[in-house]
Image: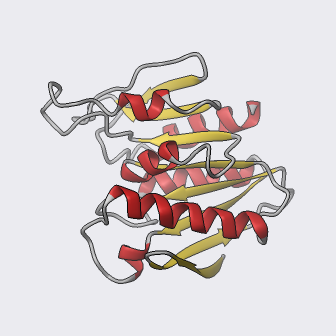
Amino acid sequence: MTAIEVETPHGPARAHVERAPEVRGALVLGHGAGGGIGAPDLIAASRAARAAGFTVALVEQPYRVAGRRSPAPAKQLDAAWIAVVDRLAARELKGLPLVVGGRSSGARVACRTAAETGAAAVLCLAFPLHPPGRPDAPSRQPELDRVKVPTLVVQGDRDPFGLPRRGRLRKVVVVGGDHGLRAGSAVEAAVGAWLARL
């Protein structure tokens, strides 16, 4: 795995790139708000992607690289993400179809910026539909609905953040678990099957 520092409008980000043996595409994944790139579902999705012929880039947002746990505002996250994906698409992932995604907050960033990054598809792990225990709060479903490319959502059956709706281009796979999505084999199977059909 190669670590690449990328300058963004909000400080340096870091991308950890691991090439697949026979490359047919690339998967770029972002972490959740308070976690890092070592989350179990990100690792499971990365394994599935490499097995399916996708080079994987795990992206650390500038606030994490700087050692902070509290996430930056959405506009800063989006701008930094776009800068990283653009840089990777111009060099390490040049010419490859791009699948973008992430877990929780990282999934939201990927959805909001799918058009700007030229994504061919979007992968959402544990999409946070609403704050825990507040199904009456404004839903984030519109962020998913605005994505115009094939999308996979892998969600735990006990996720307190809710369950997103399926859509014409959006598949929702429910696996055992909560928002942490620690059911690695189920996540790996769902992601692998979806990538193989893309």
Q: Position of residue 126 (x, y in %)?
A: 38, 41
Q: Position of residue 124 (x, y in %)?
A: 49, 41
Tell me the residue at 24%/35% (across/down).
130
Classify residue 55 by image quadrant. Answer: bottom right
- In screen coordinates, is 167 left or right of 73? right
Q: Quadrant of residue 76?
A: bottom left
Identify the residue shown where x is 49% and y is 25%: 172
* Left or right of 157, for residue 194: right
Q: Where, by quadrant of the figure, is residue 142 drawn? A: top left
Compared to 174, does 99 lie above or below? below
Q: Residue at x 43, y 55 (%)?
A: 40
Position of residue 167 measured from the top left corner of the image (x, y, whole percent): 52, 18
- Looking at the image, residue 188 sits to the left or right of residue 56; the answer is left
Percent position of residue 109, x then y: 45, 51
The residue located at (38%, 26%) in the rendering is 164
Quarter containing the C terminus: top right
Residue 32 shows up from this direction: no
